[in-house]
Amino acid sequence: MTEDKMQIVNKDNTFLKDSTILISRVGDEFETYQLTDKNNEWVKSILDGITKDFDPEVKPEGFEHLNVELQLKNARDYTFGEHLIVKGKASGAYTATCVRCLLDTPQEFETEFTCAFINKRYEDDPEYEEVDEIYISDETADMFFHDRGKADLREAVAENCFLAINHYPVHDADCKGLCQTCGVDLNTDSCGHSN
């Protein structure tokens, strides 16, 4: 497989309109799909899940977005049989409330990940009970499961986005926060309660 082959972007993203896909419909060479929250409902639901957790009062117009690039490949091996390899990149922007002073602040994130969807029968296998990553198709990948050849990509993308975002956002590394006595913003005012 050439590097050029991996970079071909499939213009027909209707294949991924639903996050659950049949592995048998995926080719044995990597195909790349570009998805955004603007053209795909399940990608939008991931962004909605991120923004719901922070719920700021003010959201900058047009700032929030989620872009996802997925490279999909149907693979087989002696150990796991037919499985799906997913190489992904995700980047996004959202608005969150500073945990120190409660100021709404823009946040951005980027992540790259590799996942393998193996047969669900391995989920109950004691050998894989404590395992999150496996070595498969010549690389290490996060382990997910397909059910009778159906793989839900949303779980893998959402999990990796969730791990990439800042769960304790601050608007500035030097944010002084709020006074614990009177609640004044110590970045802009002085109240005499704290040193």
Image (cartoon, grey):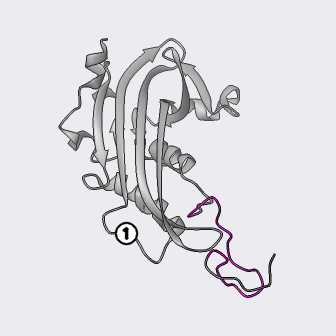
Which residue is label 1 attached to?
A: 60
Question: Does residue 97 sit above or below 43 in this rendering?
Answer: below
Q: Is residue 154 left or right of residue 96?
A: left
| Residue 13 position by quadrant | top left
The location of residue 165, given as percent across then percent down, is 54, 52
The location of residue 110, given as percent across then percent down, is 46, 43
Q: Amino acid at mark 1?
A: Pro
Question: Residue at (44%, 25%) from the top-left corner?
Answer: 83
Q: Is residue 85 left or right of residue 9?
A: right
Regarding residue 152, the answer to whether it shows in the image is no
Question: Residue at (61%, 78%) from the top-left corner?
Answer: 188
Magenta highlight range:
171-187
| Residue 70 position by quadrant | top left
Q: Nearer the viewer, residue 102 or 177?
A: 177
The location of residue 35, given as percent across then percent down, is 30, 45
Question: Residue at (57%, 47%) from the top-left corner?
Answer: 163
Q: Main secondary structure of the magenta part?
A: loop
